[in-house]
Amino acid sequence: MLRNLTVAWFLSIAALQALQPSEEALKKLASQVDKALGLHPGMTVADIGTGAAVQQPIRIAGEVAPDGKVVCVEVSQLYVDKIKARIDDEHVPNMEVVLGKENHPMLARAAFDAILVSNAYHEFTDPEAMLKHICDALRPDGTLVVVEHYSLTRRSESRAVQVKRHDIAREILERELTAAGFTIKDRIDPVFVNSPDRFRYLVRAEKTK
């Protein structure tokens, strides 16, 4: 199901949530991400661009345990080391970390049931190459979920300008996914309200059959 909400609705919700996000709102966001990924025990999931947000893949690792696993991908050795330390501290046996490249996540071909790119797609310096490798890493019926930020009032600006603000509008993302061989299956826009003019959306896509 494809969902779009009006500008007026955006702003009314934003006014209510402009302060510190509630625990309930954060739990709802996590639940929507997990649902979009289709999590169940035994799945193999990649989290590309994990950064400091290690709690999300740790939660996912719990959902796919005991036989499933989560592979975190980072292009920074510093973050790779930090993620490994966190995994050890949390005693999560079904997680591992891969040092990727700017244009390649270094994931095995046809090995993943789902791939998550959360607040990291705008960091891709070569999105065309990255999407090709993500497509290759997914199994034939695999799912790609992207969560990103955008500004409601500035979403029509050029891609380059948006990326400088660490944003990317859904319309741009969906064009790039379609060009890379994905079919958009679902969207939630917004999926989370950060402030009166800053939102997150979620897009779920599959390989085009």
Image: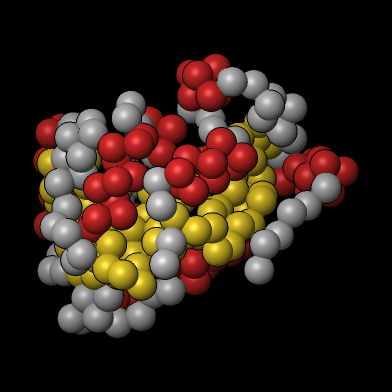
Determine the residue positioned at 53% across, 30% down: 167
Q: How is the image coloured?
A: secondary structure
Most foreground residue, 103 or 11: 103
For residue 113, above or below residue 88: below
> How far across and how far down the image is residue 144, in percent?
40, 58
> How far across and how far down the image is residue 155, in percent?
66, 29
Q: Residue furthest front?
A: 209
Q: How many marks?
A: 0
Can the viewer see residue 42 in this picture?
Answer: yes
> How far across and how far down the image is residue 164, in percent?
48, 19
Most foreground residue, 173 or 57: 173
> How far across and how far down the image is residue 103, in percent?
23, 34
Determine the residue positioned at 49% across, 24% down: 163
Q: Quadrant of the C terminus?
A: bottom left
For residue 38, side relative to residue 45 (left or right): right
Most foreground residue, 44 or 127: 127
Determine the residue positioned at 35% across, 80% down: 40
For residue 24, side relative to residue 41 (left or right): right
For residue 28, side relative to residue 15 (left or right): left
Most foreground residue, 134 or 197: 134
For residue 58, side relative to residue 100 (left or right): right
Q: Quadrant of the N terminus?
A: bottom right
Determine the residue positioned at 74% across, 27% down: 153
Can the viewer see residue 65 in this picture?
Answer: no
Q: Residue furthest right?
A: 8
Please identify the quarter of the rendering in which residue 96 is found. bottom left
